[in-house]
């Protein structure tokens, strides 16, 4: 298939135009997130129905559009209807029949299932005008995600893919680096390091071979940006890597991902072999004389292996532990040779920068953080999913306008941003622009893009304990501060959530957090203090409540709450709670049939709250635990 | 000006010449200026950097681990800055809190590098830290020459480094991660069943009594 890229591109484009203009297409999102929502059943249902009805329609499996809350997602385009492609949400397999009968066999576009129509911006990026979030979003990394078939390099080519590489191969390495420098691109792996500076350092090394590594380890719990990009549009990353390789003079590349991402691995293998087939990786790339190939490396999914020096050790076949720096990998990396490690999204953005120019890119976002930021929005927010906004967009816009606000009409309490080692920011920070420097100023980090929204039912002390627990288990354990300092913070926090801490422990926790931040060997420990320091800074009253009041204001910490049935609300004697209580801890008053919790038997599982019919809503949690005695006294025993 | 290949730096007000690329720690020690350290091996490149006892302050840069940071012409180093002292103390306190300190029954009878370092740093086992929940592990005395007591290990990593320098196949390495990271033998076999030759390099560098010679 090797041949002239322009010819291949032309053919692909013709095929694409035919598909877009005159074919009946059904696009079904089958990335990992879609699959979790049942999209494979949806796919199968469509395939069976279409076959049965004998309709001529192209079913295309696509990646993720970022609208994970509405998964499974389906886009149907019937050119004969005169309508643009229509995006449907929540299309579980039971709803397939309705769509087939309505819109595929008939001419009813089933608007009750539709989220909106798919329109295209000038540069071909799809958007949904009916969804207000697209007014704020700007999709540079996610441009193709959820619209093209990731397994068909032709669809990538048809949308201009690899033409940027062709252009870049004609540029000098200095020219490429200058473009990236002009874009003021900062690495998307977390620390926001100046990409051009890193590349320059490697480029100037007069030793070789040089290596290039794409960091697709994505160890943050709850983060899935890199997975989505690789599952939905792998060639945008591969193209960026080849461009980088040419700029650095690297001859071998690696994509390091985790074995827990089987679909990423499967799709990357196909994408790499297709790329090899058309000659955009391998020897003499597009006739330029540049040689560069990419190998896929599967890690065992240790969080610490996401750190670049640990990743290098892991690729070398050694234990994946970070090592102190200097020397930096650009000088002493894989096998001791100059090496650059960059994040998945960094490479995807490199492709866009070389395509549209560094100057164009630098105009997007804020002056010191150019371009866009991709977040995995999760937690107590309506529209969970992937978000890509220009840097500098405020947290409020991301959470309330793009994310649709807090679920169930609850109130916002905090947003945990930057992954496990990020920080928790309060309401007062909502007007903060999201960029590297602003986040750092308030004690959080950009991280690689986790954003978890917390509401009034989340306890901040427990939240801090949760993240520190993760870090204490997942840090490499190599240095004293990381291994013992983080663990000591955890021991203190474990006491707090049990109401066992003292004021002195609170001071110790704070002191430790500062020391761990400054004294750790790698950045992991360095940022491990963030969840503690930010919750202490913004939610100190909650710590005080746990420590001095032995009380959990959010009613979360099990040992600091008790359950209580409000006698005035428990009217009907419905017995729901009695029948479901696993420990027979609910007694019924002989005369009134009202219920009462026997505290010595209660294990605080919360089942009674869940089963108490909403019209009674008689079970409540109280804190501190002794409060229940007062209530019982007031109620007359 | 320093000679070619050398740079001139100031440590605690004293002018010191050091070879280019040398780490601050060795430049200081060569000049007779003490900086606490346990994991440092001069020949190790990159350095181990695990113990976190060697912090110093560099003007314009802040706190750095002196065994990791190379010297630069004109660098001004203070070993007694408050922040550096606090961090060194903290690291030592954490190590002591995680150590049994049963020196009376220990083969080294309190005469180990670790305890001496703690004494010279004037750091005692802290009372205000939570006790670390370590489980007692069996002592491995299967080897004819070397006894391995994992309970004493402070995880500095020097033994692994010297062993790797000497032997092709290293009989032990670190396993697990986070707080649970510890030294173990290859496939957790008794040391006597590994390829350990008993050269004793690891015993020489062990700052505690995790690896020691069997008494004759
Ligand atoms: C504990 C730890 C975990 C990390 N995990 C990741 C990760 O999952 N993905 C990533 O791209 N970078 C991760 N990093 C950052 C990398 O070390 C490195 O800075 C990054 O890959 C550089 O790429 P960039 O310049 O494109 O940001 C991690 C860092 C630390 C300290
Ligand atoms: S001597 Fe520097 S970290 Fe151990």
Image (cartoon, coloured by chain):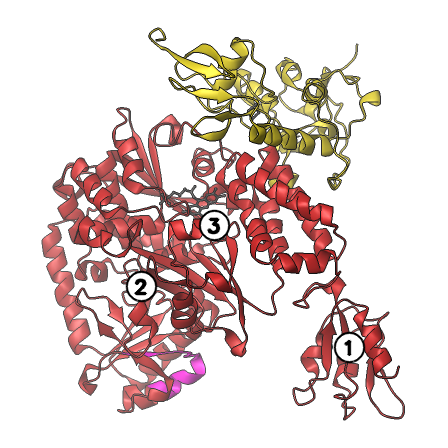
Label 3 crowd bin: few (<14), some (14–19), many (20+), radius 10 Å: some
Residue under mark 1: which chain is it in? A
**In the image, which residues are magenta?**
A86-99
* Residue B99 image offset from top left, x and y in percent: 73, 30
Indicate left or right for A516 with A591 as reference: left
Q: Is residue A273 visible?
A: no
Q: CA distance from mark 1 to mark 2?
A: 49 Å
Q: Residue at the spot x=35%, y=28% of the render? A: A331
* Label whose residue precedes the other's in the sequence (3 or 2): 2
Residue under mark 2: which chain is it in? A
**Quadrant of the rendering where the C terminus of chain A is positioned:** bottom right
The shade of chain B is yellow
Q: Look at mark 2 in the image and give the residue it sits on.
A: A145
Q: Residue A128 appears in which quarter of the rendering? A: bottom left
* Label whose residue precedes the other's in the sequence (1 or 2): 2
The answer to whether dots 3 and 2 both sit on one chain is yes
Question: Quick one: SS at disc 3?
Answer: loop
Residue lying at the far front of the rendered structure: B13
Letter of the chain shown red in the rendering: A
Q: Which mark is residue A564?
A: 1
Please determine whether, in this image, residue A407 is positioned above or below residue B113. Answer: below
């Amino acid at each position: 298939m090797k041949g002239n890229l322009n010819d291949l591109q032309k053919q692909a484009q013709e095929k694409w135009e035919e598909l877009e203009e005159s074919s009946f297409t059904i696009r079904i999102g089958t990335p990992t997130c879609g699959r979790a929502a049942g999209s494979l059943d949806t796919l199968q249902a469509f395939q069976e129905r279409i076959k049965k009805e004998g309709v001529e329609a192209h079913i295309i499996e696509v990646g993720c559009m970022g609208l994970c809350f509405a998964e499974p997602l389906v886009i149907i385009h019937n050119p004969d209807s005169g309508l643009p492609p229509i995006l449907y949400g929540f299309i579980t397999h039971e709803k397939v029949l309705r769509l087939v009968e309505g819109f595929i066999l008939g001419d009813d576009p089933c608007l009750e299932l539709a989220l909106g129509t798919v329109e295209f911006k000038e540069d071909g990026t799809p958007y949904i005008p009916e969804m207000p979030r697209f007014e704020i979003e700007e999709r540079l990394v996610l441009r193709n995600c959820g619209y093209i078939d990731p397994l068909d390099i032709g669809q990538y080519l048809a949308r201009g893919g690899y033409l940027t590489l062709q252009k870049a191969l004609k540029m000098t390495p200095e020219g490429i680096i200058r473009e990236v420098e002009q874009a003021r691109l900062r690495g998307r792996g977390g620390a926001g390091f100046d990409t051009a500076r890193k590349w320059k350092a490697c480029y100037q090394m007069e030793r070789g071979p040089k290596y290039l590594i794409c960091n697709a380890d994505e160890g943050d719990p709850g983060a899935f940006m890199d997975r989505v990009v690789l599952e939905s549009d792998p060639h945008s990353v591969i193209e960026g890597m080849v461009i980088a390789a040419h700029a650095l003079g690297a001859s071998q590349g690696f994509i390091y991902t985790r074995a827990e991402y089987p679909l990423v691995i499967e799709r990357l293998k196909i994408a790499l072999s297709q790329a090899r087939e058309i000659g955009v990786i391998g020897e003499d790339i597009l006739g330029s004389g540049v040689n560069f190939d990419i190998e896929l490396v599967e890690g065992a999914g240790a969080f610490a292996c996401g750190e670049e020096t640990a990743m290098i050790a892991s690729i070398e076949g050694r234990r994946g532990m970070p090592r102190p720096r200097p020397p930096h990998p650009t000088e002493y990396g894989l096998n001791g040779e100059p090496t650059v490690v960059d994040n998945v999204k960094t490479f995807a953005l490199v492709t866009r920068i070389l395509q549209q120019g560094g100057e164009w890119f630098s105009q997007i976002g804020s002056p010191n953080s150019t371009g866009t930021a991709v977040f995995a929005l999760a937690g107590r927010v309506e529209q969970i999913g992937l978000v890509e906004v220009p840097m500098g967009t405020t947290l409020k816009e991301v959470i309330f306008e793009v994310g649709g606000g807090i679920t169930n009409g609850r109130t916002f309490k905090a947003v945990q941003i930057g992954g496990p080692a990020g920080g928790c920011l309060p309401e007062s920070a909502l007007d903060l622009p999201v960029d590297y420097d602003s986040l750092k100023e308030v004690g959080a980090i950009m991280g690689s893009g986790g954003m978890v929204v917390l509401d009034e039912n989340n306890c901040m002390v427990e939240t801090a304990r949760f993240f520190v627990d993760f870090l204490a288990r997942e840090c490499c354990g190599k240095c004293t501060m990381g291994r013992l300092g983080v663990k000591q913070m955890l021991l203190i926090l474990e006491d707090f959530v049990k109401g066992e801490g003292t004021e002195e422990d609170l001071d110790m926790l704070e002191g430790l957090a500062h020391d761990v931040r400054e004294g750790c060997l790698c950045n992991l420990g360095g940022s491990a203090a963030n969840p503690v320091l930010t919750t202490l800074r913004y939610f100190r009253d909650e710590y005080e409540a746990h420590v001095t009041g032995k009380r959990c204001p959010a009613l979360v910490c099990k040992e600091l709450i008790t359950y209580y049935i409000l006698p005035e609300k428990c009217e009907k004697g419905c017995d729901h709670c009695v029948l479901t209580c696993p420990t027979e801890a609910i007694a019924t008053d002989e005369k009134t049939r009202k219920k009462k919790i026997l505290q010595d038997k209660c294990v605080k599982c919360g089942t009674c709250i869940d089963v108490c019919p909403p019209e009674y809503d008689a079970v409540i949690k109280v804190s501190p635990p002794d409060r229940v005695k007062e209530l019982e006294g007031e109620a007359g025993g | 000006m320093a000679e070619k290949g050398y740079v001139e730096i100031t440590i605690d007000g004293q002018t010191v010449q050091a070879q280019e690329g040398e780490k601050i720690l060795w430049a200081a020690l060569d000049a007779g200026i003490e900086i606490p350290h346990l994991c440092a091996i001069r020949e190790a490149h990159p350095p181990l950097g695990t113990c976190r006892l060697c912090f110093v302050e560099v003007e314009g840069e802040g706190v750095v681990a002196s065994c990791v940071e190379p010297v630069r012409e004109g660098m001004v180093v203070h070993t007694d800055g408050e922040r550096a002292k606090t961090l060194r103390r903290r690291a030592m306190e954490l190590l002591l809190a995680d150590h049994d300190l049963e020196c009376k029954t220990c083969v080294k009878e309190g005469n180990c590098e670790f305890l001496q370092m703690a004494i010279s740093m004037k750091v005692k086992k802290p009372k205000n830290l939570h006790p670390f929940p370590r489980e007692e592990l069996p002592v491995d005395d299967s080897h004819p020459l070397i006894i391995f007591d994992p309970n004493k290990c402070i995880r500095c990593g020097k033994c692994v480094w010297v062993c790797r320098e000497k032997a092709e196949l290293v009989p032990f390495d670190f396993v697990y991660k986070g707080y649970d990271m510890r030294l173990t033998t290859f496939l957790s076999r008794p040391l006597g069943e590994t390829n350990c030759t008993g050269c004793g390099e690891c015993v020489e560098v062990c700052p505690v009594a995790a690896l020691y010679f069997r008494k004759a």
